[in-house]
Image (tube, coloured by chain):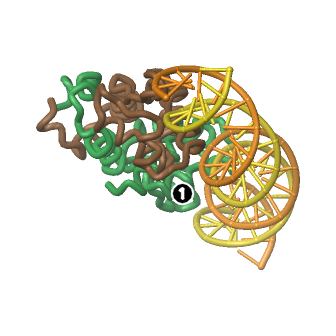
Chain colours: A brown, B green, C orange, D yellow
DNA sequence: TCAACATTTCAAGAGATATTGAAATATGAA
DNA sequence: TTCATATTTCAATATCTCTTGAAATGTTGA
């Protein structure tokens, strides 16, 4: 992952509504969720939800696909994994003290 | 890590100069670096370096300690590890597709 | 005490970001 | 076609962020 992409992803994740959206979409899995459902879930009116979904898409964190009247958004797991790697590796050089603070016992 | 802390850390890391500072300080280790040296390293005049160092400190990513005339900054490895955990676990629920995109083979 | 150094704080301006409600666009069904 | 639904786009406003240069603060040594 390029530094520029990481900066955009960090910026996207630094907003409460957008972080909530990401969490919800991660839970939704491959099925994803429509803009309307997402907005309702995070308590945002349509234009606000659309604004933040667009920001997340531009940052590469979510993808969108029209399905009939709805536009379905999904979390981009590869992008999120790439950001974890960037933070741990490129940014922190896998420093032992950083790794020590993470619990990877049940996932690798 | 609380969501609020994570939001502040993401915001702090979403700025080019600050990301450079963090990378430099991670390399510096426990010795840290003075504000002046950091500013020179990242190409920022004193007031600008101070502004960003203050933002990083407020976000809990670095610590500061006066040493004679200098103020020495150090990366907070525990905080950075906490953010990695937050992103991977709280935010992504250690989703297999996220974990699969990270290479943990040489650090755990 | 005084001068030099290291850093922060302040004020001002430019630019970016977030929110809202209204209007526009796109889709599907009667 | 016409209407209802889903979503985005737009304009206006408010707020936050970043940058710069100047001034203030704190520290050391002559």
Point out residue B7 in the picture as x, y percentages from the top left corner. Answer: 45, 50
Query: How many labels, in total?
Result: 1
Q: Secondary structure at mark 1?
A: strand
Front position in the image: D29 or B51: B51
Occupied quadrant, residue B18:
top right
Left or right for A75, reference C20: left
Q: In the rendered image of this protein, does residue D25 appear above or below residue A1? A: below
Residue drawn at the location 43% of the way across and 55% of the way down: B60
State the residue at coordinates (50%, 41%): B13
Q: Position of residue A26 (x, y in %)?
A: 32, 35
Q: Nearer the viewer, residue B14 or D11?
A: D11
Furthest toward the left, the residue is A106
Q: Chain of mark 1?
A: B
Identify the image quadrant of residue B102: top left
**Is A99 on the left-hand or right-hand side of B12?**
left
Residue B99 in view (yes/no): yes
Answer with left or right where residue B13 lies relative to residue C26: left
* Nearest to the observer: residue B75 or residue B93: B93
Q: Quadrant of residue A107?
A: top left
- For label 1, the crowd category at 10 Å Cα-Cα, with few meaning under 14, some 14 to 19 and many 20 or more, is some
**Residue annotated with mark 1:** B71
How far from the left and from the top, in percent, is residue A93? 35, 31
**Going 53% across and 42% down the picture, which residue do you hit?**
A49
Quadrant of the image for the N terminus of chain B? bottom left
Q: Quadrant of the C terminus of chain B?
A: top left
**Residue B97, percent from left and from top:** 25, 25
Answer whether residue B24 is visible to the viewer in this image. no
Residue in view at x 19 percent, y 23 percent: B105
- Taking depth in this image into account, of B82 and A45 the one nearest to the observer is A45
């Amino acid at each position: 992952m390029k530094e520029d992409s990481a900066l955009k992803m960090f910026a996207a994740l630094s907003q409460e509504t957008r972080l909530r959206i990401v969490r919800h979409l991660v839970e939704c899995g491959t099925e994803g969720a429509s803009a309307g459902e997402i907005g309702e879930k995070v308590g945002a009116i349509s234009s606000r939800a659309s604004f933040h979904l667009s920001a997340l898409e531009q940052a590469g964190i979510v993808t969108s696909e029209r399905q009939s009247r709805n536009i379905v958004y999904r979390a981009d797991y590869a992008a999120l994994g790439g950001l974890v790697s960037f933070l741990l590796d490129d940014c922190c050089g896998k420093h032992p003290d950083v790794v020590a603070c993470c619990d990877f016992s049940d996932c690798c």
